[in-house]
Amino acid sequence: MKLAKYSIGVGDRFGHEGVAQLAALIRAAEQNVAITPVWNKSFREHTTIGSKPVDTRRAADEAVCAVGWQAAYFVDADHIGLKTVDDFIQSSDFFTMDVAEEIGRPVSETALQEYLQFCERFSRPFRIPGIAEEIAVTPEIVRLIAHQYLAGIFEAEQIYKRIATAVQKPFVLELSIDETEQPQRPVELFFILAGAAWRGLPLDTIAPKFTGRFNKGVDYVGDTARFAQEFEADIMVIKFAVQEFGLPKQLKLSVHSGSDKFTLYPIMRKILQKQDAGVHLKTAGTTWLEELIGMAAAGGDGLALAKSIYSDAYNRQAELVKPYTTVLDIHPERLPKPDSVMTWSSAEYVNALRHIQSEKRYNPDFRQLLHVAYKVAAERGAEFTQALRQYADYIAPNVTENLFERHIALLFLG
């Protein structure tokens, strides 16, 4: 199986919505747009819920069989490192190597000198086709970039070797550097790719950190013109690096926390079409929110459960938000009080949570808190699992509509 030009991370916290997700991709295929689904779930998410990587593989395989999906699909070991990769080896064929913790750590002077020698012909100003401005570098600038990112490259090399030794089938390799404090400029991305080539990493995708805020489950906050310039420059950097260093021809950008970035999708689509480039978009957490929306829309016990989960989340804000502080901007004063939510109708709950920005009741703070409240639902155990089955007829249409209308259509079909 090969990753298509366009691929999308269809993360599914509880493993129940594979058929509904594939329904959205089937609709895209009917419009002659092939998109590879990639079920992604991180070690943190498995730990929080109490699931295992094999559960994600099983859910994906069952969904594919149920709808007769004939194209490629993958299961992503999302944001793994050396300490966690082994748990995913048998179940995954897409590996997102997260090396953020190694960024900025020192490397030996010998390794540094070898890398600088590898990059020596690019240690002076050079041009990248499609980028108007000359890439203004000096040996000192390359050294600074190396100091910042080489330890991460070496970590990725060790993870890759572990995977390549154990996995006896083709797999997709992604390098994630998005969970850093500062975004990478195109020049930094170029020298990171140089490092990947130097260490023999056959990357299929790379996920840099972009300018602006990519918060969980809500729209982009930032300078869209600057993002557009950066996104297009990164695509051209990748093309140039593939040509210069012999990296895999299918190498493409990956956009993490990519769900609900409605402001950016038309911008990205225009650039992707202009550059004839592919992209991987991760949209993990929104599936769980559509499950809550479906339950609330059902009314009765489903609505009561959705309200109860919010009440618990409200009272556990600090705990739930802590692992995600870099990708959330919640204003506590804008969160509705649980007593108020308990009086809401189905429509009021749904309209506050569903990401329709023209809806006057839509509340991005409410949505962000519930985005990270899947731990509360997991703690309900059989009660929540039974609700997923009981209200499947309400949930599935919301999952499909969200993925197709608000993501696929805007990014790939417009």
Image (cartoon, rainbow, N blue to C red):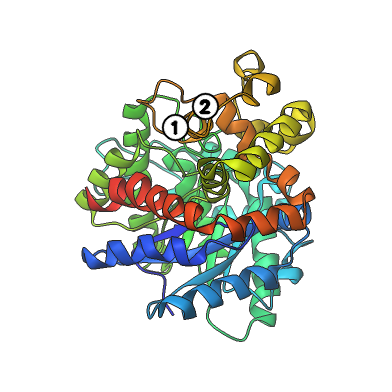
The image shows residue 253, relative to residue 74, as above or below, that is above
Say left or right for 139 vs 244.
Answer: right
Is residue 119 at least partly visible in the picture?
A: no
Total numbered labels: 2
Q: Nearer the viewer, residue 171 or 334?
A: 334
Structural crowding at the residue carrying mark 1, measured as other residues with C-alpha within 10 Å and reported as few (<14), some (14–19) or many (≥20):
some
Report which quarter residue 240 is drawn in. Answer: bottom left
| Amino acid bearing label 1 | Asp
Residue found at x 41% / y 38%: 261
Q: Quadrant of the N terminus?
A: bottom left
Residue found 67% across the figure and 44% down from its top = 103
- x, y percentage for residue 288? 58, 49
As shown in the figure, which amino acid type bears the numbered disc 2? Pro
Q: Are marks 2 and 1 in contact (CB under 8 Å)?
A: yes
Q: Position of residue 171 (x, y in %)?
A: 54, 75
CA distance for labels 2 and 1? 9 Å
Q: Say which element carries label 2.
A: helix
Comparing 189 with 373, the one in front is: 373
Answer whether residue 168 is visible to the viewer in this image.
yes
- Residue 271 lies, with reference to residue 319, above or below; the image says below
Residue 212, image x and y in percent?
A: 47, 29
Nearer to the camera, 379 or 2: 379
Decide: is 334 above or below 403: above
Residue topped by disc 1 = 219
Q: Secondary structure at mark 1?
A: loop
Frontmost residue, 111 versus 269: 269
- Give me the disc on residue 364: 2
* Badge 2 or badge 1: first in the primary sequence: 1
The single residue placed furthest to the bottom in the displayed view is 168
Say left or right for 389 vs 34: right
